[in-house]
Image (spheres, grey):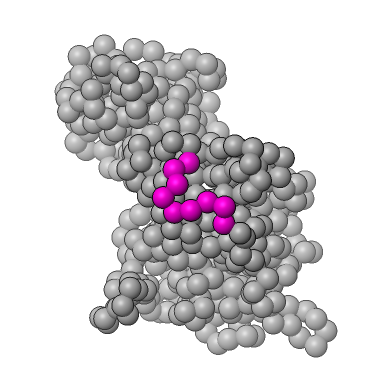
């Protein structure tokens, strides 16, 4: 289920079956969070999909923080961030409509299954850090990272939800909270150094002087690299690295995700236990075990700790690693793209939609390259898709690709390839056949960030489904791309 925390039960003034904004039907009351908001499972009757609805009564000024945070989060699309679909203030009540996640909160999983091992902890931290890094890249702090807002979907996806905008959020607090999540997964305790968390979680273990005990002092089997990382992130005397640097380093160590479970960024691969589920309850999926020897072989010689990530850092900008850092990481930086470096890929079109590609790199969000209108979301069944090819000029280490669209609702992939076979129908067909997809998302916001950690010269943003732009049009499905930016390491 989608859950944002525990709290006192609020009196219900709405009931199952009620339709909000002539669109969102309430199905089941799930819980009330610590802020007194009601959490419901509902259905979007227009798109016929399940949604989570978080309601606050009354609306107006008392709901501004919730609504502002939802609107800000809706502008950032990332595979590890919950999709935010709508935010409505009706005066007497206000509510946020977001993606429904079938799964459980991190808090619930640790309570049911016990402490996580190092591999599973690293995989979850990788997903959370990636989500936080995407928010930070947009200029927004999450402000509410804790085991109740980190969800693990039944398909293994790590999802961060319920951002706050209460004036206390900061980039540094988010990064320290990631470390606290690691401490919680390893020990079952939430250290107060991690900031806000549900009051039901016990504080971290402490010695007689009140100092926080390291995870390996609480339980056996915690590897040194993970113990050091968690404790460094919680150490107020050390400036934490940026979330982008932290996510990049965790991606190197996410063995459970990248090395042993196949491709798929920040996704935990699960197998079902051979057991019969209790009536009305789905068996909790278990992470496939990873041998400690494999992990040790891969991280031999690697130093992972905030001191290493923060070598010679400028404390004013949250840790800028130097070229001499033992990890070799650098903060991502944007690439200046010209019109000559972008073109439209349309393998089965009439080439009429291949004009105006330069608008996606002109720095003006008021201009855009746009598709024609189509009768159905799949380009009317006339083609496998369309996309924008970016030639970086040489092989670069791509950290992320950011796409700003005219409206949300499209489905897109990030693809990479070795060459551009030519600006023609035949060349575009070869691109469609040979370029490898490394990310596939249903875009729920106008701004989408595709995380990446790979070396390539050619990047393709490939659209397979179009959003509905105008239901009254004979060809209502189309999309426009306002800006594309690429960050490299």
Q: Position of residue 362 (x, y in %)?
A: 51, 17
Is 437 on the left-hand or right-hand side of 34? left
Measuring from the top left, give residue 312's x and y in whole percent.
Answer: 73, 53
Residue 387 picture quarter:
top left
Task: Locate residue 29, reporting x and y percent.
Answer: 48, 59
| Residue in view at x 61 percent, y 64 percent | 9
The quadrant holding residue 87 is: top right
Dominant SS in magenta: loop
> In the image, is residue 441 above or below residue 39?
above
What residue do we see at 51% from left, 76% from top? 110
Q: Nearer the viewer, residue 83 or 246?
A: 83
- Quadrant where the image shows the N terminus: bottom left
Q: Position of residue 6 (x, y in %)?
A: 60, 66
Q: Which residues are magenta?
A: 12-20
Q: Residue at x 60, y 43 (%)?
A: 94
Query: Would residue 18 be counted in the magenta stretch?
Result: yes
């Amino acid at each position: 289920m989608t859950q944002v925390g525990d709290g006192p039960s609020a009196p219900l003034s709405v009931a199952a079956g009620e339709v909000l904004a002539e669109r969102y039907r309430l199905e089941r009351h799930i819980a009330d969070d610590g802020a007194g908001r009601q959490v419901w499972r509902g259905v979007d009757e227009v798109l016929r999909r399940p949604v989570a609805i978080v309601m606050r009564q009354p609306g107006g000024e008392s709901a501004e923080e919730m609504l502002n945070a939802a609107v800000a989060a809706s502008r950032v699309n990332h595979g590890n961030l919950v999709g935010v679909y709508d935010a409505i203030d009706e005066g007497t009540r206000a509510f946020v409509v977001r993606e429904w996640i079938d799964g459980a909160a991190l808090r619930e999983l640790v309570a049911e299954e016990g402490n996580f091992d190092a591999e599973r902890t690293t995989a979850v931290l990788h997903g959370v850090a990636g989500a936080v890094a995407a928010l930070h890249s947009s200029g927004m702090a999450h402000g509410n990272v804790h085991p109740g807002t980190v969800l693990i979907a039944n398909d293994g996806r790590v999802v961060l939800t319920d951002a706050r905008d209460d004036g206390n959020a900061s980039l540094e607090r988010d990064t320290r909270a990631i470390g606290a999540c690691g401490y919680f997964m390893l020990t079952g305790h939430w250290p107060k150094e991690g900031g806000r968390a549900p009051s039901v979680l016990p504080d971290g273990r402490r010695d007689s002087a009140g100092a926080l005990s390291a995870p390996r002092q609480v339980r056996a089997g915690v590897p040194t690299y993970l113990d050091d990382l968690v404790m460094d992130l919680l150490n107020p005397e050390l400036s934490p690295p940026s979330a982008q640097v932290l996510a990049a380093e965790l991606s190197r160590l996410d063995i459970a995700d990248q090395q042993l479970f196949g491709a798929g960024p920040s996704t935990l691969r699960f197998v079902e236990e051979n057991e019969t589920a209790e009536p009305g309850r789905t068996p909790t999926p278990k992470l496939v075990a990873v041998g400690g020897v494999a992990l040790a072989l891969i991280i031999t010689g690697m130093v992972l700790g905030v001191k290493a990530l923060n070598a010679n850092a400028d404390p004013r900008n949250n840790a800028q690693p130097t070229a001499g850092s033992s990890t070799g990481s650098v903060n991502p930086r944007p690439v200046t793209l010209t019109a000559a470096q972008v073109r439209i890929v349309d393998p089965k079109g009439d080439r009429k939609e291949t004009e105006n590609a330069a608008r996606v790199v002109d720095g003006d969000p008021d201009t855009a390259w746009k598709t024609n209108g189509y009768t159905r979301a799949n380009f009317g069944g006339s083609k496998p898709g369309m996309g924008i090819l970016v030639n970086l000029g040489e092989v670069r280490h791509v950290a992320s690709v950011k796409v700003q669209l005219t409206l949300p609702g499209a489905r897109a992939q990030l693809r990479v390839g070795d060459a551009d076979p030519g600006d023609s129908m035949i060349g575009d067909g070869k691109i469609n056949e040979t370029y490898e997809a490394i990310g596939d998302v249903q875009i729920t916001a106008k701004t989408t960030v595709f995380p990446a950690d790979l070396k390539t010269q050619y990047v393709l943003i490939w659209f397979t489904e179009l959003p509905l732009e105008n239901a009254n049009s004979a060809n209502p499905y189309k999309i426009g791309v306002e800006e594309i930016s690429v960050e490299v390491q």
